[in-house]
Image: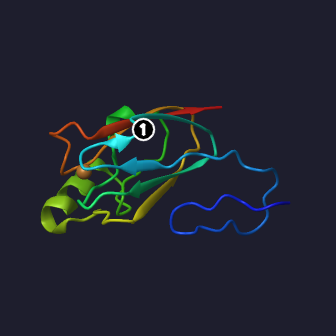
Amino acid sequence: MTGMAVGLGGIVFQGCVESMPEVVPDVRMSASAFLPYKLEVKVGQTLKFVNTNSRLHTVTAYENKIPEGADYFASGGFGTEIEARKAWVKNLGGALATGEVFEHTFSISGTYHYFCIPHEMGGMMGIIEVTD
Ligand SMILES: [Cu+2]
């Protein structure tokens, strides 16, 4: 096996990998957008959301815009959208600073809508399409 792609921050694969995973591009955060806005991944793939900007951002799923039965996800590890929103207002809970990464593994296919709490009004949101 030759060298493996190493993402931002030098993440190294560890443990047993049964088949070579497809390379999944990271979602990056600009000043007011997730790039790319829409991304397709396969069930079981882990996506990295990287704050490549100087502003604080969050990655927060819209609880009613993810597939039924899917795990809720939010930076900070909150279990619900309302918890994530409250934590942000209280003490910037869930904030990702420059260079910080949030990861989520998608285990159910479907369409996931998510947003950034402080920049929601500015339209900072994105879509992940998860396919079997
Ligand atoms: Cu933001």
Instruction: From the top left corner, tell me how far across and down residue 108 is, in percent.
Output: 57, 38
Report the number of numbered marks: 1
The residue indicated by pointer 1 is 36
Q: Is residue 68 left or right of residue 30?
A: right
Q: In this view, does 101 lie to the left or right of 11?
A: left
Instruction: From the top left corner, tell me how far across and down residue 125 is, in percent.
Output: 30, 39
Q: Nearer the viewer, residue 49 or 45?
A: 49
Q: In this view, does 30 lie to the left or right of 42?
A: left
Residue 44 against residue 42 in the figure, above or below: below
Asked if ligand 1 lies within 8 A of label 1, the reply is no
Residue that lies at the very extreme toward the front in this rendered image: 2
Residue at screen point 60% across, 46% down: 24
Residue type for callout 1? Pro
Quadrant showing the N terminus = bottom right
Instruction: Please indicate, yes or no, whether residue 46 appears anywhere in the rendered image.
Output: yes
Residue 109 against residue 115 in the figure, above or below: above
SS for callout 1: loop
Q: Which of 25 and 132 is in front in this view?
A: 25
Residue 4 against residue 23 in the figure, above or below: below
Residue at screen point 26% across, 41% down: 124
Instruction: Please indicate, yes or no, whether residue 66 appears anywhere in the rendered image.
Output: no
Residue at screen point 34% across, 59% down: 78
Q: In this view, does 84 lie to the left or right of 42?
A: left
Quadrant showing the C terminus = top right
Q: Please rate how many residues cluster around mark 1, counting C-alpha atoms within 10 Å: few if below 14, some from 14 to 19, many from 20.
A: some
Q: Nearer the viewer, residue 112 or 3?
A: 3
Instruction: From the top left corner, tell me how far across and down residue 131 is, in percent.
Output: 60, 31
